[in-house]
Image (tube, helix red, strand yellow):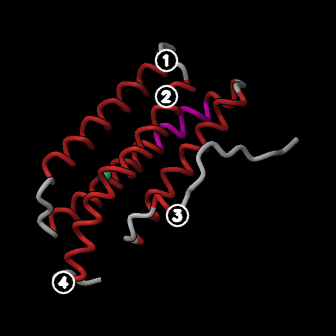
């Protein structure tokens, strides 16, 4: 049975109403689903694939965070330092977990679950907070685009 497994589904309520950021968040969700698929399959090939996707995810997370941080700097977001610290803590944790997984000390499913929870919570609370700030600026005509 060739059924695609969807672990996290994008919902409109996740939107921060900034198209570039929404696109990147959707890509993160796609990567989480890819990891989940590999997890569920559990074969040796799937394990190799899992390692590959972890690397891909980490690279994408870093790319996305720097895009977000550039955006927040450009609008002089007041909570920038806190937001950036959250990103840094998350990257550190993912790097550590990916290493643990490579060494056979971590369980793939736990990793995927953490990823999912963190991403959704971060979007729902912290990214929404900066988007509100940015949308207000836009409303006042201080920001283009
Ligand atoms: Fe963020």
Q: CA distance from mark 4 to mark 1?
A: 48 Å
Q: Which mark is residue 140?
A: 4
Going from the N terminus, do you reach mark 4 or mark 3 first? Answer: 3
Q: Quadrant of the N terminus?
A: top right
- Magenta part of the chain: 48-56
Q: CA distance from mark 4 to mark 2?
A: 42 Å
For label 1, the residue is 106
Going from the N terminus, do you reach mark 4 or mark 1 first? Answer: 1
SS type, badge 1: loop
Q: Which mark is residue 12?
A: 3
Residue 130, x across and y down, in percent: 25, 60
Looking at the image, do the residues carrying marks 3 and 1 touch, with CB atoms under 8 Å apart? no
Q: Residue at x 45, y 56 (%)?
A: 25
Along the viewing direction, whichever of 49 and 86 lies nearer the viewer = 86
Going from the N terminus, do you reach mark 3 or mark 1 first? Answer: 3
Q: CA distance from mark 2 to mark 3?
A: 25 Å
Q: CA distance from mark 4 to mark 3?
A: 25 Å
């Amino acid at each position: 049975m060739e059924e695609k497994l969807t672990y996290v589904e994008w919902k409109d309520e996740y939107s921060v109403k900034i198209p570039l950021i929404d696109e990147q968040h959707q890509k993160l969700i796609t990567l989480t689903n890819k990891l989940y698929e590999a997890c569920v399959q559990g074969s040796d090939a799937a394990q190799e694939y899992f390692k590959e996707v972890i690397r891909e995810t980490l690279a994408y997370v870093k790319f996305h965070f720097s895009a977000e941080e550039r955006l927040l700097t450009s609008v002089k977001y007041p909570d920038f330092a806190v937001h950036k610290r959250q990103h840094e803590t998350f990257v550190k944790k993912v790097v550590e977990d990916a290493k643990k997984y490579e060494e056979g000390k971590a369980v793939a499913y736990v990793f995927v679950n953490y990823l999912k929870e963190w991403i959704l919570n971060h979007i729902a609370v912290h990214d929404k907070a900066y988007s509100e700030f940015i949308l207000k600026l836009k409303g006042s005509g201080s920001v283009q685009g």
